Amino acid sequence: MSTDTDNAVEHLEEFGYCLLPDLMPAAWARAFADGCLKIHADPELADNISGDEYYQTLFGMLNLDDRTWDCAAHPAPVAVAQHFLGPKCRVVEACSKPTWPGAPHQALHVDSASNFLRVPNIPWMINTMWMLTDFTAENGATAVVSGSHRSGLSQPPAQLDVDGPDLLPICGRAGSLLMWHGGAFHMARANRSDQIRVGLNVAYYPRWFNNWVENHHRPVWPETYERMPPQMQRLCTGRRVHAREEAYELPPLPPPAADQS
Ligand SMILES: O=C(O)CCC(=O)C(=O)O
């Protein structure tokens, strides 16, 4: 690992997040952001999107734009993710996340923890946000509560003031990368600017994690996998199929009918 990556690991360990500035050229990132916005506008892909006119998540980016692989298989985040999740961790999903002017704060949350009875004290997910446009405090930069990954809570306390000093906006030039522990409280800030902010979210999980819990995730298609370079294929160890039902466990059965006797 490089010194930069070592520092990133140390920072993430202690504070629950880290910033890796300028990993990709800004012009490359901005061109990718334009590509993402075109995909969001494609009516044929409307089913891949959750959200509204202010904030959207477009699932399945690994199948939709090969530039996603350059981010997901970039050696720096892979080294950081492997440090926390083990050498066999995998990329499960990549989503494009624009936020438009006028967007309110996203709800403060943690990631993929809703099914835990007790939150484990080892990381179950390392999440990332590639800044495809510049991220500023005004245009909706992701904000993180430093140290909250140690809280052991599966959701942030309701009384936490999202406009107060606990929420740190993580800003950077296009091409920079924010990484965080899935248990860190975080959110996309309100977009109070006149610019669209675009992020690419790539999620790394250990293989023991049951990704069925994320009910919008899209599997990698077999034909996508065939085209991937080996370093990206090594990170995509899930089932290569088209339908979610073929990739993940089926949802739980409904509760048994009430005993009529
Ligand atoms: O869009 C953002 O800045 C935050 C994304 C986020 O909260 C997530 O991916 O869990």
Image: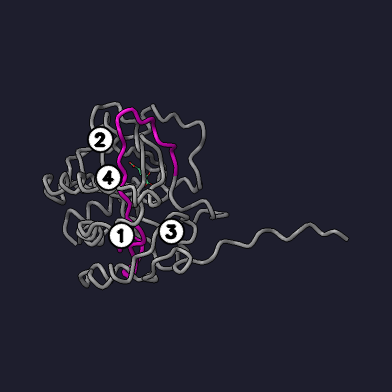
Q: Amino acid at mark 4?
A: Gly
Left or right: residue 51 versus residue 80 is right
Q: Gap in Å between the C-alphas at discs 4 and 1?
A: 19 Å
Of circles 2 and 3, which is in front?
2
Which residue sits at x=31%, y=69%? 87
Residue placed most toward the observer, 127 or 48? 48
Q: Gap in Å between the C-alphas at discs 3 and 1?
A: 13 Å
Precedes in sequence: disc 3 or disc 1: 1
Whole-percent x, y for residue 146 in the image: 36, 40
Q: Is residue 90 magenta?
A: yes
Residue placed most toward the observer, 150 or 191? 191
Precedes in sequence: disc 2 or disc 3: 3
Residue placed most toward the observer, 118 or 6? 118
Left or right: residue 191 versus residue 182 is left
Residue 199's disc is 4
Q: Which residue is mark 3?
A: 122
Q: Quadrant of residue 255?
A: bottom right
Q: Amino acid at mark 3?
A: Ile
Task: Name the quarter where the C terminus is drawn.
Answer: bottom right
Residue 124's disc is none
Whole-percent x, y for residue 178 in the image: 27, 47
The verdict on label 4 being within 8 Å of ligand 1 is yes
Q: Please, what secondary structure does the residue beneath circle 1 have?
A: helix
Q: Gap in Å between the C-alphas at discs 2 and 1?
A: 28 Å
Q: Gap in Å between the C-alphas at discs 3 and 4?
A: 27 Å
Of circles 2 and 1, which is in front?
2
Crowdedness near tag 3: few (<14), some (14–19) or many (≥20) residues, C-alpha within 10 Å: few
**What are the residue bounds of the magenta stretch?**
82-109
Precedes in sequence: disc 2 or disc 1: 1
Q: Which residue is mark 1?
A: 81
Q: Which residue is mark 2?
A: 196
